[in-house]
Amino acid sequence: MAEQSQSQSQSHPQYQLQTNFQSKVSQPTLNSETTTTITTDRSLKPSTFSKIPFRPRKIRKVSDEKKITTLPESVKVLPLKIIRPLSSKGEIDLAIQHLCKSDPLLAALIDVHQPPTFDSSRPPFLALARSILYQQLAYKAATSIYTRFVSLCGGEAAILPNTVVALSPQQLRQIGVSGRKASYLHDLASKYINGILSDSSVVELDDKSLYTMLTMVKGIGSWSVDMFMIFSLHRPDVLPLGDLGVRKGVQLLYGLKELPKPSQMEQLCEKWKPYRSVGAWYMWRFVESKGAPAACTSSTLIGGAVVEQKQQQQA
């Protein structure tokens, strides 16, 4: 029975496959170099050699196909949204056409006022430093201080971060700059020197990111950023929700009993998009025409930009 069982197990296919495999491994076909190596190495016994696992060599497939240079149709690349500044040729005309079409009340106001101009070309750092000096001052007094500041720096072209940070508070105080504003100027210059801000990054940042970065500077709040974006960067779609002149203009334009709140301002001026900066400009002119210049004095604080424009138009 044992011999019969053994003969049956030897006739099984799995047993035959294992026997064939071992016979092939124990009697490999070797070249002359391999044979010499094995025979001279006494430590390598036949029983040990037969147990060495056989691993087939991996073959790397090299494809001659050309690399894919185009994206699949399923991948959509959204084009970058290019915002043209209001100083671009023809942009003011497009803004006026849009505002007249979208808001009949504003259209009547546009008809009785000259179109705005946005042609200031000061570098961002200079414009920001200038706006700090003009804060909470009458235009003539601020202009006098700024003139002395330019002379102290050695000209407008020399108003650079390294120049400003080197000025002591005492030097700035002698030309009429308060200690607080001196700290604001130094903080602005330091952030430029440390690489947190730069003229190129200020120009390239979108409106939301610019708010975040510039409000990190001492003395620059959301209103200052609004004015800077409108009159220095000429951004077309800025609505200064905190500006008293714009709020008063919206109140008069739409016959509101009270000054509109920010949420109401956004709702009423939604139709002005994407040219809310131009709509805000007409609100300042509207309030002035009603004989209420005190209501829009805040709009003249950003380096006298609005006042300068008015003087250019009257010249």
Image: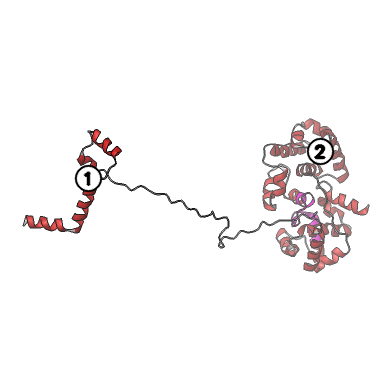
Name which residue type carries label 2: Ala
The picture places residue 268, in percent across and down from the top left corner, at 74, 64
Query: Is disc 2 placed on a helix, strand or loop?
Result: helix
Q: Give residue 271's quadrant in the image.
A: bottom right
Residue at the image position 81 percent from the left and 59 percent from the top: 90
Give the vertical position of 103 relative to 33 (above or below): below
Give the secondary structure at mark 1: helix
- Badge 2: residue crowd in 10 Å (few <14, some 14–19, many ≥20): few
Q: Residue furthest front?
A: 32
Residue 290: give its label: none
Residue 298 in the image: state x and y as whole percent.
81, 51
Q: Is residue 256 visible?
A: no
> Where does the N terminus fall, quadrant-wise?
bottom left
Report crowding for label 1: few under 14, some 14 to 19, many 20 or more residues within 10 A (C-alpha). Answer: some
Residue denoted by label 2: 157
**Left or right of residue 6: residue 196:** right
Cβ–Cβ below 8 Å for labels 2 and 1? Answer: no
For marks 2 and 1, give the CA distance.
89 Å
Q: Which residue is mark 1?
A: 26
78 sits left or right of 266 in the view: left
Q: Residue furthest left?
A: 1
For the record, the magenta segment spans 227-250
Q: Is residue 225 visible?
A: yes
How has the structure been colored for display? secondary structure
Q: Quick check: 186 above or below 58? A: above
Picture coordinates of residue 163, whole percent (x, y): 77, 34
Q: Nearer the viewer, residue 94 or 185?
A: 94
Q: Residue 275, percent across and down?
A: 76, 60
The nearer-to-camera label among 2 and 1 is: 1
Viewer-proximal residue among 243 and 307? 307
Can you tell which quarter of the image residue 128 is in? top right
Q: Is residue 132 magenta?
A: no
